[in-house]
Image (cartoon, grey):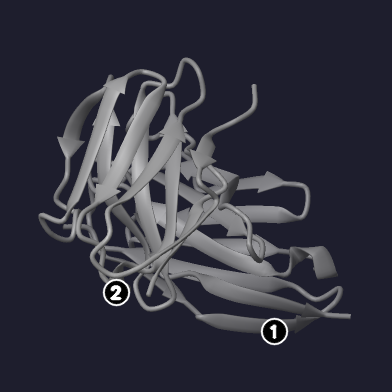
Amino acid sequence: DAGVIQSPRHEVTEMGQEVTLRCKPISGHNSLFWYRQTMMRGLELLIYFNNNVPIDDSGMPEDRFSAKMPNASFSTLKIQPSEPRDSAVYFCASSLAAIRSEQFFGPGTRLTVL
Amino acid sequence: GENVEQHPSTLSVQEGDSAVIKCTYSDSASNYFPWYKQELGKRPQLIIDIRSNVGEKKDQRIAVTLNKTAKHFSLHITETQPEDSAVYFCAAPPGNTPLVFGKGTRLSVIA
């Protein structure tokens, strides 16, 4: 298995533009997580899905952020419109179960909003 | 909600010495405690975890201890090597929810 796949690996955009981050979880994993990592705030859980259903999006910073999981092998995190303070590394992770189960992280997407 | 505190934020040790990182958590219902290692520019990866029915777990040079009464758990690395240099994160799940991560400890092993 190739592990969790994320694209793009790097994204540089201008303030106000729409940004879409993509994730392919490990086949057979039932849970998918989106995290944001910054120096100041550490590793923050934004949203997680169980069997393609969003369970908890309380970590999504504001309405500019949205996430979807249309099927078991694909998820997107969208920021519209983007702002400089959204600059961070965004990780997707998947696991067999949502709790008490090892999370496998993707390589991350480094987002820079100018 | 769960609050996970991790100390120290940075740690420097001489090669061959031991390193200890400590975490405290607030939710007494937490019952799974993993540690992740993140090398520079890489993704976090699980290195060891412990469940609340045991007090200690070892894997070669790495060990984790758990004190449920005091609500703290620790990562111990013995005979440190330069490749142990990384950021280490502890985590705990508040009840039946996914993980809350600590802020991380940057470990530097000096050769």
Residues at discs 1 and 2 both on one chain: no
Q: Nearer the viewer, residue B40 or A113?
A: A113
Chain hosting mark 2? A
Q: Which mark is residue B12?
A: 1
Under circle 1, the secondary element is strand
In this view, B81 is above or below A29: below
Q: Nearer the viewer, residue A113 or A4?
A: A113
Asked if residue A94 shows in the view, the reply is yes
Residue B110 placement (x, y as % from top left): 82, 82
Residue A95 placement (x, y as % from top left): 44, 30
| Residue linked to disc 2 | A85
Q: CA distance from mark 1 to mark 2?
A: 31 Å
Binning the other alpha carbons within 10 Å of mark 1 as few (below 14), some (14 to 19) or many (20 upward) gives: few
In this view, A67 is above or below B16: above
Asked if residue B102 shows in the view, the reply is no
Quarter of the image where one finds residue A31: top left
